[in-house]
Image: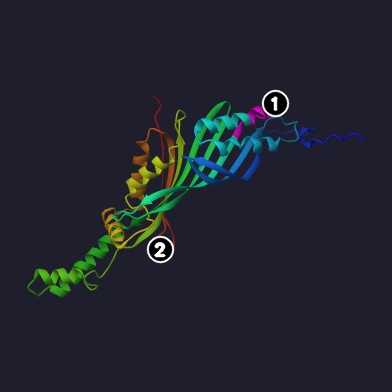
Amino acid sequence: MNALTLPDIAAQASRQALPLDWVGMCGIALPILIDGQRLSAKVDAGVSLDDGEARGIHMSRLYLALERLEQEDLRPALLRQVLQHFLDSHEGLSGNAYLRIHVDLLLKRHALVSPLAGWKTYPVSIEARLENQMFHVELKIDVTYSSTCPCSAALARQLIQQQFVDDFGNTSLQHADVLAWLGSVKGIVATPHSQRSSAQLHIHLNNQQPILPLAELIDNAEAALGTAVQTAVKRADEQAFALANGQNLMFCEDAARRLNLALQRSAAVNAFHLKVVHAESLHAHDAVAESRWTRAST
């Protein structure tokens, strides 16, 4: 009995001749390496279908090309090689290739004062494109922090002042009495409101960048904000966190400006769009600020 040739439907002519911008797969499960750390990722892989007469692309070729991402540390050069493999395996069909990697980056974070430490996740998306023989890498990073409202802090201070007048207005002040009052519930009669906030960073990397500077960009963002959320803490750490919030009062506009300046200082960054969201504890809506920047051509 003669073996039958398996049909190749993708090689058949399309019933409607029309090129397509992007064809591929989304949500492919894949282990990847970032700075030597093996992480579970979801990958989107695709190419353009420039030959409008072709029925489709060879998706299995894209899938198999992703194997290199399991074996080597993720760098721009590796991403470019995988994209070039996409195109080489679709010669005559495709001129552009795309790759998106969605992963939760794990970073070890030390407490502010005590020797404790814990792991923190940062949602990251890495998008690489090879379009018209031009290679681009973009990063999307979410950073969570605490923000304390300057207006609320000023109103709280005023109420504390008024309470002080009510309690000591006609009294000869004694150091011990004032110290005890400051440590009492009655003394700190009001506190400013703060909220968990997020910075969404969309960064276009310099095309000559040899590595993916994820940890560096996150560290710079958290340093600029001054109030990154913590992992394992003791009471001394919680007190230090309260101090950091008190010394870094910020509206969403302040946070956006701090991040803008911090990202501009990175040589790895060619352009960015950032968005900060303060999930208000006073209001039922969020406070939001956005900012963009592009490095001037030299």
Name the residue beneath numbered marker 1.
92
Q: Is residue 82 above or below residue 28?
A: above
Sort mark 1 into few (<14), some (14-19) or many (20+) by Cα contacts within 10 Å: few
Quadrant of image for the N terminus: top right
27 sits left or right of 75 in the view? right
Name the residue beneath numbered marker 2.
283
- The three-letter amino acid code for the residue at tag 2 is His
Give the x, y percent position of residue 181: 18, 71
Q: Is residue 68 above or below residue 178?
A: above
Give the x, y percent position of residue 5: 84, 34
Sort mark 2 into few (<14), some (14-19) or many (20+) by Cα contacts within 10 Å: few
Taking depth in this image into account, of 94 and 161 the one nearest to the observer is 94
Taking the view exactly as shown, the residue that stands out farthest to the right is 1
Q: Residue at x 33, y 46 (%)?
A: 223
267 sits left or right of 4 in the view? left
Local SS, label 2: loop
Q: Which residues are magenta?
A: 86-97
Mark 1 vs mark 2: in front? 1
- The three-letter amino acid code for the residue at tag 1 is Gly
Would you say residue 21 is visible in this rendering?
Answer: no
Give the x, y percent position of residue 283: 40, 63
Q: Residue at x 32, y 58 (%)?
A: 149
Taking depth in this image into account, of 224 and 50 the one nearest to the observer is 224
Query: Do the residues under discs 1 and 2 have CB atoms within 8 angstroms?
Result: no
